[in-house]
Amino acid sequence: MQPFLRPMKEEEYPLLSDFLYEAIFVPAGVAAPPRSVLSCPELQVYIAHFGTGLDDHCFVAEQDGALLGAVWVRKMQDYGFVDCTMPSLAIALYPAYRTQGLGTALLQKMLAFLQSKGYPGVSLSVQKENPASRLYLSLGFVVVKETEEEWVMVHTFSALPKK
């Protein structure tokens, strides 16, 4: 059975903390941080009170009743903040489901959704070493800010949304 993509249900929002932890890039040879890192304010902005804002949107990949990954956006002042008109994006898959096209499918679903809702674009932050950066580039994200270790990337929607 193929995974299917759907909006995350409200009762599943607590699972965003698991996906946020999976979204933390850990370079090869480096120990993963303790899960307690999720309580840091700079990470809590991604998940705290998710679903209460008009710009909180999430899609998940589900197979046989289990969630395999999630992509979510919200307007927040995070690492990938560009301006107040664009939400910031986060995405994560459990390790067993990476490199199978699921991340691409989730991102394409979210990009199409955001465009249909009239957002001018979406932003994110990614460490340059993170293999996901190649996925973002392949889907039309462009680097708008660079530090020694990270890129802030933006995907803009040039076509007008369908009415």
Image (spheres, helix red, strand yellow):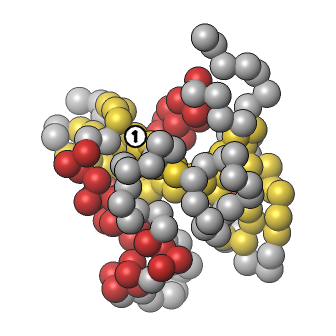
Q: Say which of 154 and 75 sits in front.
A: 75
Q: Say left or right for 157 vs 146.
A: left
Residue 44 position by quadrant:
bottom left
Disc 1 marks which residue? 59
| Residue positioned 73% across, 19% down in the render | 160
| Residue positioned 66% across, 19% down in the render | 161
Residue 21 position by quadrant:
bottom left
Q: Position of residue 72 (x, y in %)?
A: 46, 49
Q: Position of residue 93 (x, y in %)?
A: 40, 55
Any part of residue 137 in sight: no
Establish if 113 lies above or below 155.
above
Establish if 128 lies above or below 53.
below
Q: Position of residue 25 (x, y in %)?
A: 53, 72
Establish if 161 lies above or below 154.
above
| Residue positioned 34% across, 85% down in the render | 36
Q: Position of residue 113 (x, y in %)?
A: 53, 29
Q: Quadrant of the N terminus?
A: top left
Q: Say which of 147 and 105 sits in front.
A: 147
Q: In the structure shown, which secondary structural element does the residue marked by tag 1 occupy?
A: strand
